[in-house]
Amino acid sequence: MTERFKVCTRCNNRLPLTKEYFGERKNRKLGFTSHCRECDNSRKREYYKNNREKELQRYKDYVETENGKEAHRKSVKNFLKTDNGRKMLRQQRARRRNMGYNELHENILDEEIEWHHVDNENIVAIPKDLHQLYSGAWKYHREWCNEIVRQIYGDNDE
């Protein structure tokens, strides 16, 4: 089978007609875009550079939709599975340790946890779902979460 080639309409380079060099476009005769991926990426970078605020607002609007929230959750979850994601988590934990917070209790929970600030110096593990349940009510967040802490660990934690 002979390799097919295509000329990019932007840079005029003759490149192999593969997914590696051209984007797929089902409605085109050959099934690929008329410009190469490199040209398309440089066009997108230039557009973003010239319309940064507009693009950031468009992304913020999208993330506020249900589809956007779900897509963001999935991308974060996938990122945390990568080497860079695990490295970021290690760095966050190190920063938390170096900020002078004191763990009041060992983590006794078998479920997924988040660290809750009992006060400005002390943290304690509480169930992630409960912590997130109260995360929207910033005025009462600490008060309500501290009640959970008292129920889990007893009254001697503050």
Image (spheres, grey):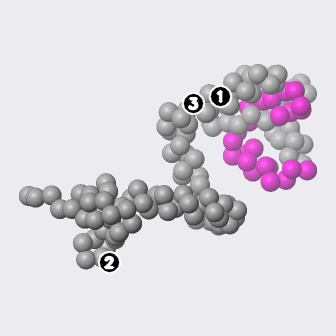
Residue 125 x, y percent position in the rendering: 74, 31
Residue at point 66% right, 60% down?
52
| Callout 1: SS | helix
Image quadrant occupied by the N terminus: bottom left
Residue 87 tag number: 3
Q: CA distance from mark 2 to mark 3?
A: 42 Å
Q: Quadrant of the C terminus?
A: top right
Q: Are marks 1 and 3 in contact (CB under 8 Å)?
A: yes
Q: Earlier in the sequence, mark 2 or mark 3?
A: 2
| Residue type at the position of mark 2 | Asn
Q: Nearer the viewer, residue 57 or 88?
A: 57
User: Is the residue marked by circle 2 packed among few (<14), some (14-19), or many (20+) residues within 10 Å?
Assistant: few
Q: Earlier in the sequence, mark 1 or mark 2?
A: 2
User: Mark 2 highlights which residue?
Assistant: 27
Label 2: state its secondary structure: loop
Counting every numbered tag in the picture gives 3
Magenta span of residues: 117-139
